[in-house]
Amino acid sequence: MTGLKNLPSISIIDDGSASNGAAAMPRAGDRDAGGGGGESAESKLIIVGSGPAGLTAAIYAARANLEPIVIAGYAPGGQLMITSDVENYPGFPEGVQGPELMALFRQQAERFGTRFVDLDVDRVDFGQRPFRLWAGDVEYRAESVVVATGASALWLGLENETRLRGRGVSACATCDGFFFKNRKVAVVGGGDTALEEATFLTKFADEVLLLHRRDSFRGSKIMQDRALAHPKIRVRWNTEVLDVLGENSVDGLKLRDTVSGEETVEAAQGLFIAIGYKPNTDLFRDWLDLDGQGYLVVRDETGSKIDGVFIAGDVHDHRYRQAITAAGDGCRAAIDAERWLEAQGITESATASAW
Ligand code: NDP
């Protein structure tokens, strides 16, 4: 068993300054959408983010009696909420819908006592412990934090691209490529992601159209060579997508030549957007190290430059970006957080067998 030691008695502070007048203050449970009323706004562990990484961290932390709070965001569930069929998550031989998978993760975390706050974190202060995080008007305090805010795929911003997302429009060839057997698909982008996705899609599609807005790729030479040499890949240089065509699913693309201005329509049943990702790190840039692409930098497996702040999932991982790898990362971060809390004397006893 673990137990809470040394936490201050403050529950909620609404003006940014320390106060012990918790009774008169709003309580976290009054404001959250998932937790019970009257819950404390402090915890041994707060997890920010509710994709596979955050929710797996919550399951592990809750089972180790850390009584975690997950600040899940206004749109909880992460990128899987905009994915339809997930066929590569182990344990679901018939596949599972992305939102259903996330609902199951969340039920499992709740079963062991995780509390959820369905709000975005507005700001954090990691300057000293307990760490402080503000969501809505409530100040949350934690002895340790797991940052699992993920990354967001960038989209072109077209109305029909949004409307047909999950119905031919995708940002993940690994997830959705399988559905395009013997079809013609297009990939937008000129970086390594686009080159990799185009090459991957040749396993399924009859033809892969690679649409790039300039006349040279940004991606690595080896990936360029591989894509350019592939008989199924046809590159259209200097090409931008003006519109995605189709009623209930994608059946074509309206394209424009950026040099001549000529507009054409290409038939295609799939459109993969591969124009980069934006890691959701804005909240943390004053506190944690970011790499050149804006991803968080991990130290010693899941740690960060601040003791007690751990990192999991796509917010640092621009290589694998899979639900299963994010989930694995969440598990590792929770175990590291639990061991760290124990080493600080904040939790009482070794729980290596509790996982
Ligand atoms: P990048 O930022 O490298 O490339 C994005 C591409 O999308 C660019 O070619 C860019 O065009 C294009 N683009 C951006 N915005 C638009 C838009 N609105 N409309 C049309 N095209 C647009 O992102 P990646 O995701 O490809 O790669 C990110 C990082 O991850 C890179 O460092 C990459 O090397 C790495 N990576 C490595 C892999 C590997 O090693 N296996 C696999 C995948 C990624 P333009 O060139 O004109 O700016």
Image (cartoon, grey):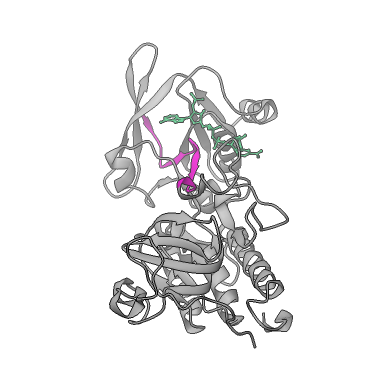
At horizontal 50% and vertical 53% (from top left) the residue drawn is: 150
Residue 56 seen anywhere in this rendered image of the structure = no
* Residue 272 on the magenta segment: yes
Depth check, front residue: 262 or 66:
66
- In the visual, does 15 lie left or right of 152? left
Q: Residue drawn at (32%, 65%), measured in percent from left and top?
A: 14
Horizontal side of residue 196 vs 353, given as left or right:
left
Q: Using the image, determine if residue 123 lies above or below residue 232.
A: below
Residue name at image x 63 percent, y 84 percent:
2
- In the rendering, at what x and y percent does residue 194 appear? 54, 35
Looking at this view, is 160 or 149 the one in front?
Answer: 149
* On-image quarter of the C terminus: bottom right
Q: Where is residue 216, by image quadrant?
A: top right
Q: Quadrant of ligand 1?
A: top right
- Residue 44: give x, y in percent of width and height: 55, 74
Q: Residue at x 47, y 68 (%)?
A: 141
323 and 84: which one is in front?
A: 323
Q: Is residue 284 magenta?
A: no
Relative to 293, is 311 above or below? below
Residue 303 drawn at (x, y percent): 66, 57
Magenta highlight range: 266-282
Q: Quadrant of residue 222?
A: top right
